[in-house]
Amino acid sequence: MKPQNVLVIGAGVGGLAAAALLAKRGYDVEVIERCAEAGGRARVWEKEGFVFDMGPSWYLMPEIFENFFREFGKSVSDYYKLMRLDPNYRIFFGAKDIVEITADLEPNLQTFEGFETGGADKLQEYLSKAKETYEYMMEGIMYKDLDSFWSMFSPSLMKAGRKLHILSNIDEYVQKFFKSDRARKILEYPIVFLGGNPKNTPALYSIISHIDYNLGVWYPRGGLGKIPEALMKLAKECGAEIRFGVEVTHIDVKNRTAQRVQTTQGDIDADLVVVNADYPFSEMQLLDSKLQTYPAKYWEKKIIAPSAFVVYLGVDRKLDQLTHHNVFLEYDWVKHFDQIFEKPAWPDEPAYYVCCPSRYDSLVAPKGKENIFITVPISPGIDDTPKIREAYFEKILSHMEKLIGESFRDAISVKRIFSLNDFTRDYNAYQGTAVGLTHTFRQSAFFRPRHRSKKVRNLFYTGQYTHPGIGVPMALVSSQIVTDQITKQYDH
Ligand SMILES: Cc1cc2nc3c(=O)[nH]c(=O)nc-3n(C[C@H](O)[C@H](O)[C@H](O)COP(=O)(O)OP(=O)(O)OC[C@H]3O[C@@H](n4cnc5c(N)ncnc54)[C@H](O)[C@@H]3O)c2cc1C
């Protein structure tokens, strides 16, 4: 029988997108969110005129957003105004040692030629292969419901075959092209977005360079918070209802069928449940043990993506040394990755990222001030205390001031630290992870946790833990896949 009442647990990007899609297809949809606002990791925090994106700040793969809104006969421009950033980002290798990656390819070719002889040609070849791989991924894998091992092998992927370098890691792959440490660092750094280490992330993910250099780095005016705002509007326009400040505490199942959820504000009946809340939490805390497709021992064996040390700063003057996206790569990052994945500890010499959206967007900070967002990837599961946080903040701030050549601590009027314990408390994140499951070979595509429970017939999952994975565009695609699965299962 076709279910009518759909309950979505969580109003992150994945939950809101699924709510909109399912409501559009005629289901009665209710979304239950434990936080007071929408967006999950992509929430917004406002203070004294500063508008901080709490998580995502890179708007990549604009075609995926367009594809999503097109399902509703809409366009991105109906909801927010996109601008292309130039430069894409600035890299601080040391004080006064700065490299820019620009929107136009030509200066980047010159930059790589400066790193090593033939660097321009090598970059061109690297990007043309990345483009080819991206096209195969978009056509053969991205939007597919990978419900069996063989489903990964579409004709286009079979044709691409060895060219995709499925079994080598991105570090080995980049080294086949480039000798210089700088070229490697620049091309491998974005792997952090996938919650990974270049040494265990498949070379397939070199597509990130095509995304960055060829497709461009974009930004919605007003901040990335415009995305959940748009999704919430869309979901409501399609008829979905959204309740905030209500936590789901249990999914009641009878005869392998979810019947209702228990919440902090009473029980709610449901014919079908879509979970957007963190997958490990939902399986281990919301379901009885015999109904868990992925019990504790499954998660214990997984490589969990980093947590993050995030600082939001309101600064009462302009900082001209920064551009919108800034990456600080002075130190040997092998040690940083070791301290995330091998010997968990707060990184002694971190690689980190600083976003300053107020450089070109007057909507996110009061006039004459800067909105700053610092992110350091850290290991999941390590100690996180107020004392450690303050000492770490001091360390990062001093280093950043040294590299940009200016002290600005006296001008900080707003400061908030959000780290491991906050990810656990606010999002029920397993081990305090910021982004879920790392994209190793064994944790990508078909090998990610399924969109559909194997034990409960009408229970589905969407969001960053599922295929295609981490990131806002991926959470949208995940919801498109799950909606298609639901439609296929019930609408015939
Ligand atoms: C610091 C940081 C930087 C990032 N940078 C980028 C970037 O630049 N670009 C990019 O594309 N991606 C980025 N990401 C990743 C991106 O934000 C995520 O992959 C994406 O937002 C995940 O969306 P989701 O819907 O899967 O999950 P979530 O956003 O986690 O949503 C899950 C929701 O479920 C709710 N929930 C949990 N438990 C319950 C419960 N029991 N009852 C009710 N509700 C519950 C949570 O409160 C949350 O709102 C970043 C993430 C972080 C943390």
Image (cartoon, helix red, strand yellow):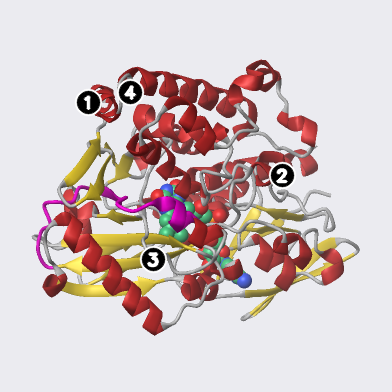
Cα–Cα gap, marks 1 and 2: 39 Å
Which callout, 1 or 2, points at the residue further toward the start of the chain?
Answer: 1
Q: Which residue is mark 3?
A: 348
Which callout, 4 or 2, points at the residue further toward the start of the chain?
Answer: 4
Horizontal placement of 452 versus 370: left or right?
A: right
Which label sits in the foreground, 1 or 2?
A: 1
Q: Relative to 429, does residue 176 appear above or below in the rendering?
A: above
Q: Nearer the viewer, residue 407 or 467?
A: 407
- x, y percentage for residue 382? 53, 73
- Local crowd at mark 1 within 10 Å, few (<14), some, or many (≥20)? some
Cα–Cα gap, marks 4 and 3: 32 Å
- x, y percentage for residue 221? 26, 47
Cα–Cα gap, marks 3 and 2: 33 Å
- x, y percentage for residue 356? 23, 54
* Tag 3: amino acid: Asp
Q: Quadrant of residue 137?
A: top right
Q: Which residue is mark 4?
A: 119
Q: Residue at x 66, y 59 (%)?
A: 275
Residue 306 visible, this orientation? no
* Tag 4: amino acid: Gly
Q: For the magenta stretch, what is the residue range? A: 316-337
* Tag 1: amino acid: Pro
Q: Residue at x 55, y 58 (%)?
A: 341
- Tell me the tag on residue 107: 1
- Tell me the tag on residue 447: 2
Under 8 Å from ligand 1: the CB of mark 2? no
Which callout, 3 or 1, points at the residue further toward the start of the chain?
Answer: 1
